[in-house]
Amino acid sequence: MRKPLTLRLLSALDRKSWLALGVFLAVALILMPVLHLAVPPESAFHVSAYAITLFGKIMCYAIVAVAMDLIWGYGGILSLGHGLFFALGGYAFGMYLMRQIGRDGSYQSDLPDFMVFLDWKQLPWYWSGSDNLWWVAFLVIVVPAIVAFIFGYFAFRSRIKGVYFSIITQALTYAAMLLFFRNETGFGGNNGFTDFKRILGYSITSPETRLVLFGLTALMLSVTLVFARWLVTSKFGRVLTAIRDAESRVMFIGYNPLWYKLFIWVISAILCGIAGALYVPQVGIINPSEMSPANSIEIAIWVAVGGRGTLIGPVIGAFIVNLAKSWFTVSFPEYWLFFLGLLFILVTLLLPHGLVGLWKTLRQSRGVRT
Amino acid sequence: MTRSLLVFLLYACCLPAHAALDAAQVRRLAAEDSSDKVAAIQQLTQTADPDAVRVLKAMAEDTLFLAGDRVVIVDGDKAFDAATGSAIKTPDNPESVTVNNRIRGELASALAALKLFDEDPRVRLASAQKLQSKVSPEMAPLLMRALDKETDDKIKALLKLAYAQANLGNADPAARLAAVKALAETSSPAIRSVLLPLADQANEPDNRVRFATISAIKSIDGRLALTENLGRVFSGLSLGSILLLAALGLAITYGVMGVINMAHGELLMIGAYSAYAVQSVFRNYFPEAIDWYLPAAIPVAFFAAALIGVIMERTVIRWLYGRALETLLATWGLSLMLIQAARIVFGAQNVEVANPSWMSGGIELMPNLLLPWNRIIIIGFALFVLLLVWVLMNKTRLGMFVRAVTQNRAMAGCVGVPTARIDTLAFALGAGIAGLGGLALSQISNVGPDMGQGYIVDSFMVVVVGGVGQLAGAVWAALGLGIFTKLLEGWAGAVIAKIAVLVFIIIFIQKRPQGIFALKGRAVE
């Protein structure tokens, strides 16, 4: 007999993991806001607005990393184009933010500034409804899903895999980047969207709005983790892992790998889209460089550093790499690329299972000794 | 019309050669009325006499005077009779000949036209070329005369065109028809726009001339489209050769060895910076031989990139054979480090690599189709590198070993092939070829730390489309993608073309995952 969904979801994580998740949410939803708003800035316990933005941003990246782990760690498919889905979500939500600027832009027009600059007289058709938050939220999910579905369907159907798939996804995001760089595409060209003013009528710079966004991101990250854990421990997840390890055998047993791969691929893209939508209002800008191949490949290193196929590893990896990045780019900007490059090499050579794998090995070897 | 007819008649009268200018004509240069002066200037121009040049020049320089009834040129304290050119006594109180702006303009064009009769063929050529864009109907007789005298074929052809253009305004429909027919043989957009008014009934009453014009425009259009398409095919070939140079190294490392080297673009960059370094050495130590820095840079680029390749293979790549995705990530890390290293050594800005003087200019195949030398040389260089790779892979012991190791590593090892060393050497060879590609790129694109990034996607596309393990596939894929891109660019713009090509490749790979030339047999997963 099948257990009810709530029970199944509850049993996706063990007790210790639920506890850890609860602690994380308590810190993100209660402790951080209190420390940011109630504690005076001169106190050592004050959490600065910079830190709120930084951690909010990194949590968005962590969602992307979990999405990447689903497809790479459990599906065995390395995508080098996840930045595309992230940016698509971001652009979809950015359209709403652009419309919320209203007549407060430099040209005091109903149209976004860049359209005035291009001498457009009305919004293009794909902008219609972009002033409605719910429609835009729908787009955030549906646009990456459709792009992923179409691309994935054709790619998986002709059984493109391994490096070929990686290179093609890279070409895909590269092509999309070129497309979005064009002014005529209608998404602000080089500059993308920026100078946001409001969200649902609330000022986007006020601490309260930022904390709400921060809290939403923390919630989304938690939901993503629980959902992903549930997904990979379900029967679906087991088939997916089997496909990763021996696709031909799974086919001979009678499963069609296409739909399994396609499903996880689309889910992964949707999660990236949502992360992008949460990222844009917090960071305040979205431009085509988010789609550059370099950005997408960086996602892979977050996952690799934390440990593939562990779900929590990618979150840890995203935090470590991005904290290191913000520290390096301030303190030693010229050495950041050396560090990142070295990280790519050392992790693949020495830590094939990432930090989580390292920790497990250490614990096991200690267990053997005692 | 009457005026041009008059001029024509006058020109006919002046045909016989004469030592001196007609005194009456020269006298009219100093007439009261400007129109008289203009008429006189035009008449003098028609004589095409060197003396006329002398007189008109004097008039333009304000040294022409009227003394009584005689026109004289006063040069300092000497004076000459304008008509005969003989020295005379400086007259008292000569009256200067007024030259207003209208006359000055007339003089300038008259002097320019008279250059057609200069003794130096180069001056005549320049003058004839100038006339191609601007010729007035009044010049027709003069051009006719110049044509008669001209011996140089090239100038003659130009003069014929100018003559035809001048005749387009002729009152006689037959003359116009002949002119249109002569111009129909050309293929320049300028002449097309000169002909355009004659295709309109409002401007051209004669039906025969009008129809001839329409068909002339059509044939010019046809030739213009032809040259344009030829130009596109050539730039497609050029782009294809660049893609081939960028991808040939990858065809060895990825195509033959199966190593995904994301740092391939940076090996190109190393080749390009080698060119820069060698150029700097030549500039500082052998400035007189600066034109030959490029051949000197060929071995430097090859060995610099090959050395980096050896280091990469020995330290990183060899531990990851058979793990393609890990290789991809690790080599990406290498590429980031190489980019940063280039930034620190050479600075973040692009550096300037100049073309040697023998690479500038080009071959003018048709009036509006110029094939630049640097592109032609790069196509030749690509062929050379291709030949080099082919010989190395198919005719040398190293190449045989590389193929043996690729086909069956264990067996190759058993018969004594040092497989590990062959891996290193093959990777170094691929890297060195990439260095040569970078050297060629330095001649046509910017040289900077990030330059390699732009080629990595393209290079992989070439290798993937061409089919893994195939040199011929890479060649066809590079040329095909190059020409396809350029033809699309002419039709849809650069960015859309690029996107269309990428989309095309994605679809192509769906259909033929093995590339154009699939290896025969069944590959086991």
Image (cartoon, coloured by chain):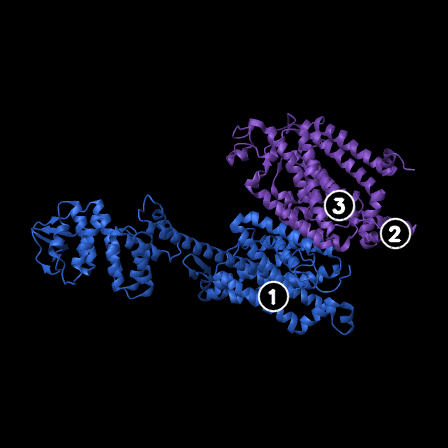
Along the viewing direction, whichever of B310 and B363 lies nearer the viewer? B363
Residue B270 in view of the camera: no
SS state under label 3: helix
Badge 1: residue crowd in 10 Å (few <14, some 14–19, many ≥20): many
Please state which of the two labelled residues, at mark 3 or mark 2, is closer to the viewer: 3
Of badges 1 and 3, nearer the viewer stands 3
Q: In the rendered structure, which amino acid carries the disc numbered 1?
A: Phe
Chain A palette colour? purple
B464, B353: nearer the viewer: B464
* Quadrant, the N terminus of chain A: top right
Chain letter of the blue region:
B
Crowd around label 2: few <14 · some 14–19 · many ≥20 (10 Å): few
* Residue A363 x/y as whole percent: 86, 48
Q: Earlier in the sequence, mark 3 or mark 2?
A: 3
Please say if B406 is above or below B184: below
**Mark 1 → mark 2, Cα distance in angstroms:** 47 Å
Q: Which residue is the site of mark 1?
A: B303
- Label 3: chain? A
Query: Is A67 or A213 nearer to us in this picture?
Result: A67
Residue at image mark 3? A262
Are labels 1 and 3 assigned to the same chain? no
Cα distance between the residues tagged 1 and 3: 46 Å
**Could you tell me the amino acid type at mark 3?**
Leu
Q: Which residue is mark 2?
A: A365
Q: Amino acid at mark 2?
A: Ser
